[in-house]
Amino acid sequence: MLLDTVKGVAGLAKQIGDIELNSKIIDLQSEVYDLIEENHQLRMNMKQLEEKMNELEDIKQIEKKLKPIGQAYYYEKGTELDGPYCTGCWDKDNNLIRIHVTESYADFHVGNCPVCKVVTTYEGKMGK
Ligand SMILES: [Zn+2]
């Protein structure tokens, strides 16, 4: 490894006993430590960016399958629609939050979002 090589060179330089060479080796060691730290930081940043990219890809995939019907979203699962989901929570934070039904009528329902607390009406027989 790079660090072992540098330590080896530092040991040899010590044996030679040249002050200027020793000083240069110490500088070199310090620069190698900085590079290792920077490399570590870059790897961490890259990992975070990869995670963010995957997250955005997931959001894109979900968004393709969301259908706005009335005041709610429904998620297309094959031939079925799952939902209703809160439009506010998805549009603002990309959170898919299922609306809780509080009242059901013949052709519409009343529900609320457990997260943003919005009360909404929606059509259809889904989500009962
Ligand atoms: Zn909500």
Image (cartoon, rainbow, N blue to C red):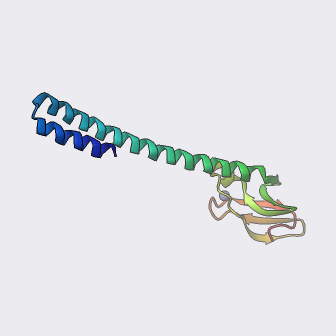
Q: Position of residue 20 (x, y in %)?
A: 13, 28
In this picture, residue 1 sits left or right of residue 110? left
Image point (50%, 44%), residue name: 46
Task: Determine the image quadrant of residue 121.
Answer: bottom right
The C terminus - image quarter:
bottom right
In this picture, residue 96 sits left or right of residue 79? left
Query: Viewer-proximal residue, 41 or 66?
Result: 41
Residue furthest right as drawn:
106
Image point (22%, 39%), residue name: 9
Query: Viewer-proximal residue, 125 or 107?
Result: 125
Q: Which image quarter has ligand 1?
A: bottom right
Q: Is residue 39 above or below residue 85?
A: above
Q: Position of residue 119 (x, y in %)?
A: 71, 61
Query: Viewer-proximal residue, 110 or 27?
Result: 27
Q: Position of residue 104 (x, y in %)?
A: 82, 71
Q: Is residue 91 above or below residue 10?
A: below
Q: Position of residue 4 (x, y in %)?
A: 28, 46
Task: Determine the image quadrant of residue 116.
Answer: bottom right
Image point (40%, 45%), residue name: 40
In this picture, residue 121 sits left or right of residue 30? right
